[in-house]
Amino acid sequence: MNWRKWLLISIVVGYMGILIIAPLGAIVFGAFREGVPAMLEALQHPHVLRSFGLTILICLVVVAIHGIFGTLVAWVLVRHQFMGKALINRLLDLPFAMSPVIVGFTLIVLFGRNGVLKPLTEAMGWQIAFALPGMIWATLFVTLPFMIRELMPVLEAFGRKQEEAAATLGASGWQTFRLVTFPALRWAFLYGLGLTCARALGEFGAVLVISGGIQGRTETATVYIFRALDDRQYAGAYSAALLLGAISLVLVLVIDVFHRRSQKSIEQRT
Amino acid sequence: MTTQTIERTTPRLPWGRWSIRGAALTYLAVFLVLPLIVVVVDGLGAGVESITSVVSSPIARHAIWLTIWTGLVMALINAVMGLLTAFVLVRYEFPGKTLLNAVVDLPFAIPTLVTGVMLVILYGPQAAIGSWLDQHLGWKVIFAPSGIILALLFTSFPFVVRSVQPVLINLDRSSEEAAATLGAPAWQIFWRVTLPALMPALVSGTLLSFARAIGEFGAIVVVAGNIPLRSQTAAIYVYGEIESGSQRNASAMSLVMLAIALGTMTLVDWLSRRRQEVQP
C-alpha cells in the first residue's frame, strides 16, 4: 500500500520538476550566467527601460478601464433582467477561445494600412494601428473576462437585501453602491484588478501584431524580449524575461491574498 | 415625511438604469463582440471557395494538422498527468504538499513568451541538455514538434488538475469503501468507481486545454521558430501572413482556428448541460 503512494508521489513530483521547475531554474541560470553586472547593464538599455515603461502604462490604463466598466457589466448581468443576457454570459468566454494573434489581426483589419475604418481615423487625425491606442485596445480584448468573472459570483452571493434596505432608508442608487455594495465586493474587485494586470503584463501575440514592433517606440516588454532573441542579444532577452516573469509571479502571489479574503466573504454569506 | 419616504422607495429613475445598461452593453460590443464579427465577416467576405483554396495549400494544411495533432498529444498527456496530480494532492498526505499545490498554478502566472524563452534556454542547441538529447538520442526539441508539445504542456498544466481536484475533494467515498469491503483490489476500485465519477470534470478540463492550445502563440513561436512545413502552427502561420501582408490567407486561417476552438468549447458546454439534465 505504502509503496504505491510513494511511487505515485514521485511520478508527480518528477513530472512537475521536469515540466515546470527545470525551465524556471534554466531562466534564472541563463540570466545570471553572464554575471550580475552584465545583467544590470542589459536592463539599463534605453529600449528595455522604454519597453517596461510602456508595458506598465498599458497595464494601468487597461486596469482602470476594466475596473470601471467590468464592474458595471457584472452589476448589469447580475442585477438586471433583459433579453439576451444568457447569450452575453456565454460570449464572455470568447477571448479565451480566440488566439491573441487573431485579436491583433482584427485590429489590423479595422485600422491597418488598408483598414476598414482607416479613412475615418485618418480624417480625425488618430493613429491607432502601430501606436499606443491599438496596443491598449488589443490588451483590453484579451483581458476582458477577468474582472467580470471575479465580481459576478460575489454579487450573486451578496444578494439584494441590504441594497433594498439602504434604498428604503432613503439612500440614492450611487450611495447604495458606494456604501453597501462596493465594500462587499472589495476583495474580489482587487483580485480582479490584479488578474487583469498580470494578464496585461504578459500579453504578447495581440500586441506584437498591432504594434508592428517598432524598436524603442512601440515595443512592450514581451515584444522587446522577442526581438532581442531574434537579434541574438541573449543577455538582454534573458534578463528582461527573468524580470518580467518575476514581476508577474510576485503580483500573482500578492493578489492570492485578496482571492482568499474574497472566497471567505462569499462563504460567510452563503 | 411619509410622502418623502414613498417617493424615495419608488424605483430609481429609469434613465439611470438604462444608461448603466447602455454603457455596459456598448463596452461589451466594442471589446468583446467586435473582433468576432470582424473575423467572421472578413473571413466569409471573400467567399467560402476562397477559404478552402487558402486552407488547402500544402503549407496551410500542414500548419492546421500540426496544430491539431500536437494539441491532441498534449491533451492526452495532460489528462493522464493532471488526473494523477489531482489524485496525489487530494488523497495523500506528505511533506511539501502545500508547496506542490502552489506550483500547479505557476504556469498561469508566467507570461507565455517567458515560458518559451525558458524552454529555449533549457533545450536549445547551445544548452547542455538540448545538445545532449540531440547528440545521444537524436531527439530535437527546439524547432520541432516535441518543443511545441512541451510548451503546450507547460502552459495548460493547471487546466485538468484544477477541474478534477474539487470534484475529487467532494467525492462521497462510501462507494469506494463498499467496493473495498467486497474485496476489490485498489486499481479496480479506481478504474470502476472513482474514475467514472471524475470523468465529466476530466473530459471538460482536457477539452478546455485543447481549445486553448489551438490559439497558443507566445510560448510556441520562440520554441518552434517559423519553419513552414515543419514547425509552423496555425497561429504562427497567421502571424507570418499578416507580416507579409497576405490578409486573405490570415483571415481564412483565423476562421478555421476560431471554428475549432469555439466548436470544442461548445462541446464542453453541451456536455456539462447534458450532465445537469441527467442528474437534477
Image (cartoon, coloured by chain):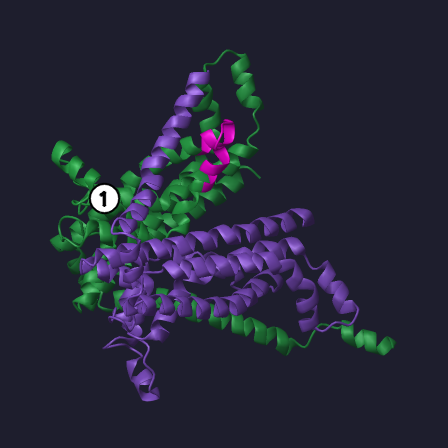
Q: Residue at x 23, y 44 (%)?
A: B147
Q: Considering depth in this image, is A256 or B28 the residue closer to the camera?
A: A256
- Chain coloured purple here: A
Q: Considering depth in this image, is A100 or A219 the residue closer to the camera?
A: A219
- The amino acid on which the numbered mark 1 sits, given as a three-letter code, is Gly
Residue B144 percent location from the top left of the image: 18, 44
Q: Mark 1 — residue? A: B147
Q: Residue A89, relative to residue B27: is it above or below?
A: above
User: For residue B110: magenta?
Assistant: no
Residue A155 percent location from the top left of the image: 62, 58
Q: Residue B184, relative to residue B250: is it above or below?
A: above
Farthest residue toward the top? Answer: B183
The quarter of the picture where residue B123 lies is top left
User: For residue B95: magenta?
Assistant: yes
- Chain coloured green here: B
In this picture, which residue range is highlighted in magenta?
B86-102
**The residue tagged with tag 1: helix, strand or loop?**
helix
Q: Residue at x 26, y 42 (%)?
A: B149
Residue B133 percent location from the top left of the image: 17, 35
Q: Is residue B10 left or right of residue A13?
A: right
Is residue B122 visible to us here?
A: yes
Farthest residue toward the right? Answer: B1
